[in-house]
Each structure stands twice: as C-alpha cells, then as structure tokens.
Amino acid sequence: MLLEVRNLQTHLQAGGAVVKAVDDVSFAIERGETFCLVGESGSGKSVTALSVIQLLPRGISDHPGGQILFQERLADGSHRTVDMLALPETERRRIRGARMSMIFQEPMTSLNPVFTVGEQIGEVLRLHRPELSEAEIRERTIEALAQVRIPHPAERADEFPHRLSGGQRQRVMIAMAMACEPDLLIADEPTTALDVTVQAEILRLMRELQDRNGMAILFITHDFGVVARMGHRLGVMRLGKLVEEGAVGQVLRRPEHPYTRQLIDALPENLSRRREVAGPAPQEAPLIRLQNLQIHFPVRKGLMRRVVDHVRAVDGVSLDIPRGQVMALVGESGCGKTTLGRAIIRLLEPTGGRILFAGEDITRLPARDMQPYRRRMQIIFQDPMSSLNPRLTVAATLTEPMAVHGIGKDRDERLALATQVLAQVQLPADSLWRYPHEFSGGQRQRIGIARALVLDPAFIVCDEVTSALDVSVQAEVLQILSTLTRERGLTLLFITHNIGVVEYLADTMAVMYQGRVVEQGEARRICRAPEHEYTQKLLAAVPRVVVGEADPTDAGAVLIGQ
C-alpha cells in the first residue's frame, strides 16, 4: 500500500475556538490507483490533502491523533514506510516534491508571477536533484513541458505565467509536480476553473502520465462527472468525516449514505426537468433581437499607442431570444459569451449591428434615454462576492436601485418589497441587516438574484451564476431560477458551460465559437443531436453522471446503471 491514512484528526484554531476540520478519517491508496475525495465546500477535503503532504500552517493546526503512513522510495530503489506526522521537517521536505507532489486549484495564484515557468520548474529539480547540471535541468524542464503537451516547450519555458492561458498554466503546474516523477500526486480541484474541452485534455493527460509512471493520485473534486471518468475508488466527506467509501461504480450506482444520494440527486442531469414551455406563437416578436452585432476591441502598439488591429470578441451575431423563455449561451472561455451578454444590456458599447428590445432599437441610445431600459434589463454576475459592495448591508443593496428608479413611496415600502424578494430566493428577512461577508457563496448568489429581481425586470443575463457553487447549492439556485421564470414570465440569457444545467433549465440554446454563433435552436435537440462539429466536440468533452439509461447519442455521459 503506497499511502495509508489511519484515524486522522486535524484541528484548526479559529478565533480562539477549535475546529475539527478532519475528524477520524481513514483510507488507503495503492500504487497506480486514483482515489477521489468528494464533498461540498467545508467538508474537509482540502484540509485532508494538506495534512497528507504536511503543508498546513504550524501555528493554527495540529494533529491530536492518527497516522499518515507513506511508502517512501529511496535512491537505491528500496522502500521504507514512514509516518508523515512523526517525521522531522527536514525529512518531510525531502519527500515533498520528490516522492509526493501537489497540484493546487488556482494555478495563477500558485505560480510566482516574477519568475518564468522554466525557472519555477527548474527550482524543483535543483532542490530535489542536486546532482544535475544546469544544462540537464534545462533539458528536463523542456522535457517536462513537452510531456504535458505545451506547444513549443523551449519557448514557453521562458514565458511568464501571465502570458499563458488558464489551461497552459494548469499544465505547467502538472509539469512542476511531475518533474521528479513522484509516487503520489495530490490534485486539489485541478480542473474547476477550466473549460470543458481543456478539462477533458487535462484529465486525459493525467491518466496517461499515471499509466506511464505507475503513479497514484489523490483527486479532490466536487464534480461527479470527473469522478466517474477518473476514479477507481471514491470517498465522500461531510463535516470532516468520511461517510462513505468504495469502488466508484458501486458508490455512484448504489450509494448507501443519504448524503451521497443527496449529492448525486442534486446533479443537474439528474434533476427533474422543469415544466416544458411552449414556444412563442409564430406572430409574436422576440423580446431581444440581435442583428449582425459586433463588438471589437482595439489593439494598440508603439510609443504613440496607435491602433494596429482589433480583437473581434463578437463578430456578426444575429440572435432572437423569445419572450418568457430561457436561452442558454454556451462555449469556451474567450469565445465572446460574456461580452455578448454585457453588450445586450449596454454595459459594453457595440461596434456595429443592432440591439432590439421589445422592438425598440436601443443600440445607440444615450445614457439618459437608456434609464427606463435599465430597470427592465438586469444582470447576475458570476462572482457574487466581487459584485456586491462589502460596505453595504443587504437592505441598502436592494433598496438603492429601487430608489433610483422610483419604486416604492418611501423607505419602509421599499424594505417591505425587499423582504418579499428575499423570501422568493429563500433567504430570511433578517438577512437585510447583514453584510455580504456574513453569507456563504450560495447565499451571496441568491442576494445577487434578489438584486436583479427588485426592479421587476423583463430580461436577465445570468453569467455563469452556478459555476463556483457546490452541486447541492447549485441545484437550489437552479430551482429558484426555474420557479421565478415560470411565475414572473422572465426571459433569461443563461451563459454557462455546464450542459446538465442547459438541459434542466433552457428552452433554446446558442453555441458560440470565436465570436460567432455556430449553432442555435431547441436546447434538447442540440444536446441530443448536435450538427456543428464544434458543438459535437464541446458536448463530447463534458463528463457527466447519468443514473439509469443514457441516450446513445450523449457522448459526454458516463453511465452508472441502476
């Protein structure tokens, strides 16, 4: 057995109190095996991983009980079993990076912005392989980048992290972790921030490296689709405890613990489809009509900052969004989804084309004339923490827009309306007097929804509003949006890359690629029988778990039978 965790306890100091972040957890990982650890935020997954590799801050953490037994491979090829909790720090440093490595969730904050990626990979080799010359370190660095399929690795080795895409930065993190060919790789949500196609490439790459090197992987995630595609065995954590463990197929097919069943049932692809909405009558005009819409950003170079080119973020999009329906807009990062959504509500100025709202051309309206439309067109942002003012209470956040648009005769009436909207998004009335930092991520997203609803809009842009949420919280937010669209007759443009969300919530669907809409139509038809080559590639890259019988055309689904 490569790693055996026995009755691990990890306690953290928080404001004078002791938090039992990991409470009597036991599991084991064999060589060449992938053990997935799943659970919601705060369940103890990442703390367990940091405990295994011993990276928790000394001042606020301790281990009152347990063992972390690791079979260390020595330089002469022999092995010895060590307890990571009992080793002196000098011994732990020798194991970390060489025999046990970790890929962190956010590569941009994990990579040093002032050093090239080659220098950062080389530092690992200098530390753990001191016998190598500088020429050999350079050669191995380029080889590591080539191994994770970064194009032109010799040139990329001299680039700084900010010059690389998100997927390339994650590959650099993998190359750094794999530089010394470790026996155990700990991957903490390594694909959460990636597009589905890049995620599929990273997962495939990790499996290939694992098969080639016989490496074991401790894979931390909340995505059951990734678990079904990557894992051999699965552990489910809740409130610091391991509540269920077993083979991936067995746990997903026949979960024994109610919490595991709750998580699987909360996946969008397993939610009951909201009521079917009949299409608009042929003579009814769409609420939003885009005609050859273009948004170009200038590229400036030289001392005089002259415009030498343009980035065509949205390049001639024509689209109809029917009244009272949900249109999903899907595509990879950089395809123009968010730019298009913000341009529709005039947060970005279009370069060309027309935007029609309820038949009125709002493309070139001055700010003063746009004021009445601001009330009818709203947006919910992806990250609620950065879009909510930390200095304002929820009451101020909700009542100020109403005051600007003349809703409510006085403050008391506006507070009453705000309370009603909070009830619609399933938040208690006393939330009015709290600040954003006092809420969880899911609750902050509900506040963002409430802020959009207080003005009683007809159209809302939802920009990746569930991408950072746990599956159960995501399910609650989706059900709230589904209910609101039905009760209020709202029209939504739902920007997402989660196909399960599209199938649950959307009536129509548009697929964007390099600033253009390459396919559009009824959402269920496109998800089941995509016509465009890019749409087919996009859907095939989505890892999903479907309990029961899968549609044979659903290439992305990983079937877990009854």
Image (tube, rainbow, N blue to C red):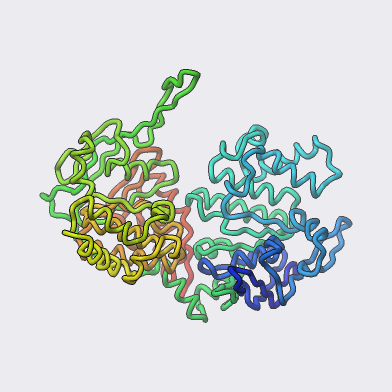
- Residue furthest to the right: 76
**Image vertical order of residue 58 relative to residue 509, above or below:** below
Instruction: Report the residue at 53% width, 61% height from top.
Output: 226
Q: State which quarter of the image contains the N terminus.
A: bottom right
Q: Residue 38: x and y, percent?
A: 55, 68
Q: Residue 445: x and y, percent?
A: 38, 60
With 251 as the anchor, is 71 left or right in this view?
Answer: right
Instruction: Report the residue at 26% width, 53% height from top.
Output: 401
Foreground of the two, 39 or 509: 39
Q: Residue 419: x and y, percent?
A: 27, 67
**Image vertical order of residue 353 relative to residue 179, above or below:** above
With 556 as the anchor, is 101 left or right in this view?
Answer: right
The quarter holding residue 63 reads: bottom right
The quarter holding residue 73 reads: bottom right
**Image vertical order of residue 181 relative to residue 68, above or below:** above
Q: How many marks can you see? A: 0
Q: Is residue 524 visible?
A: no
Q: Residue 436: x and y, percent?
A: 41, 60
Foreground of the two, 499 or 266: 266
Q: State which quarter of the image contains the C terminus.
A: bottom left
With 320 as the anchor, is 199 left or right in this view?
Answer: right
Instruction: Report the residue at 63% width, 46% height from top.
Output: 111
Q: Is residue 298 visible?
A: yes
